[in-house]
Structures are given as structure tokens and as C-alpha cells.
Amino acid sequence: MRATNPADASVVCAKFGGGGHKGAAGCSLTGELEDVKARVVAACGEAIKALENK
């Protein structure tokens, strides 16, 4: 995953056991594609809301 300021890719990837840097991070997910996509989109939404609340 890649991100630009103020987003932090490592925050999203850490939710799935991954890691990396603010600008680039990675993780591995298993499951049905639609479920995995929904989980990643939800995690990104949570990260965006957290930025908005700062």
C-alpha cells in the first residue's frame, strides 16, 4: 500500500499484521476477494476518520 501525507499506510497494514513505513507498507490477507476488499476499505476509512479527528 502507498500513501501520501497526511495518510499513514503503516497504520492500515498494522491492523492486518503487516508493517512498513508511513509512505509504503504491506500486509497479507486471506479470504474471499470481496471480503478482503471490504476489510481493507473499512480500515482505510477508519484511518481517514482518525486523521480528521486530530
Image (cartoon, rainbow, N blue to C red):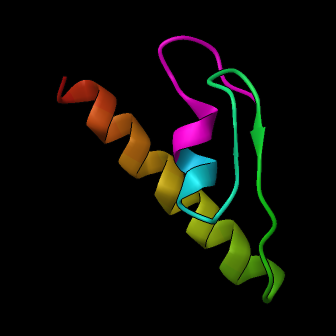
Asked if 50 appears above or below 29 in the picture, the reply is: above
Magenta residues (range): 1-11
Prevailing SS of the magenta stretch: loop
x 62%, y 60%: residue: 40
The residue at the point 40 percent across, 36 percent down is 48
Q: Position of residue 11 (x, y in %)?
A: 51, 42
The location of residue 33, given as percent across then percent down, is: 82, 79
| Quadrant containing the C terminus in the rendered view | top left
Q: Residue furthest top?
A: 5
Q: How many dots with numbers?
A: 0
Q: Could you say where residue 10 lies in the image, as x and y percent from the top left? A: 61, 38
Does residue 38 sit above or below 40 in this rendering? Answer: below
Which residue is drawn at the image coordinates 67% and 82% (left, top)? 35
Q: Which picture quadrant has residue 50?
A: top left
Q: Magenta span has 10?
A: yes
**Does residue 34 lie above or below 51 as drawn?**
below
Work out which quarter of the rendered image holds the N terminus and state it: top right
Res 22 quadrant in image: top right
Outermost residue to the left: 53
Q: Foreground residue, 18 or 35?
A: 18
Taking the spot 54% from the left edge, 11% from the top edge, the residue there is 5
- Asked if residue 6 is among those painted magenta in the image, a careful observer would answer yes
Q: Position of residue 15 (x, y in %)?
A: 53, 60
